[in-house]
Amino acid sequence: MSRITNCSVDECSYNTNQTCHARAITVGDGVHARCDTFFKNSLFGGTKDQIGSVGACKVPSCRYNENLECQAEAVQVGYHMDQPDCMTFTKR
């Protein structure tokens, strides 16, 4: 699975110090590369010693998407138009 090397969405429950701690995030809704795992809550999500990965990608127009799974070497998540998005997304 592709590792999330940086996440600048500080409000997410899975984010600590710009590191994602979700076991696996889901990206996309078929059109947009939104981080569907984003969750704003005061509780911590994930595991502190675990670095997040991309489990599924539902954006077939991304060049890194192969059979709905991300093949990028590394992924960055950040804000795009006030939405937490996969910043590694690159159109085919």
Image: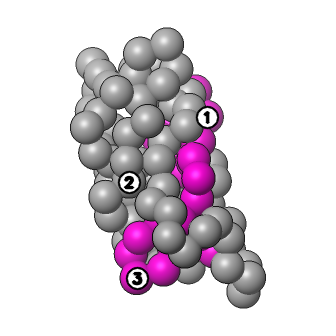
User: What residue is shown at x 38% (from left), y 54% (from top)?
Assistant: 4
Badge 1 local density, few (<14 within 10 Å), some, or many (20+)? some
Q: Residues within 10 Å of mark 2 (few under 14, many from 20)?
A: many
Where residue 21 sits: x, y (%)?
53, 65
> Disc 2 to disc 1, how far (Cα)?
19 Å
Asked if the stretch drawn in magenta spans residue 23, the answer is: yes
Q: How many marks?
A: 3
Disc nearer the start of the sequence (2/1)? 2
Residue 51, picture quadrant: bottom left
Q: Is residue 56 visible?
A: yes
Q: Which residue is mark 1?
A: 29
Q: Amino acid at mark 1?
A: Asp
Q: Quadrant of residue 88?
A: top left
Amino acid beneath label 3: Asn
Overall secondary structure of the magenta section:
loop
Q: Earlier in the sequence, mark 3 or mark 1?
A: 3
Label placed on residue 4? 2
The extreme front residue here reads 49
Q: Which residues are magenta?
A: 13-35
Q: What's the mark number on residue 17? A: 3
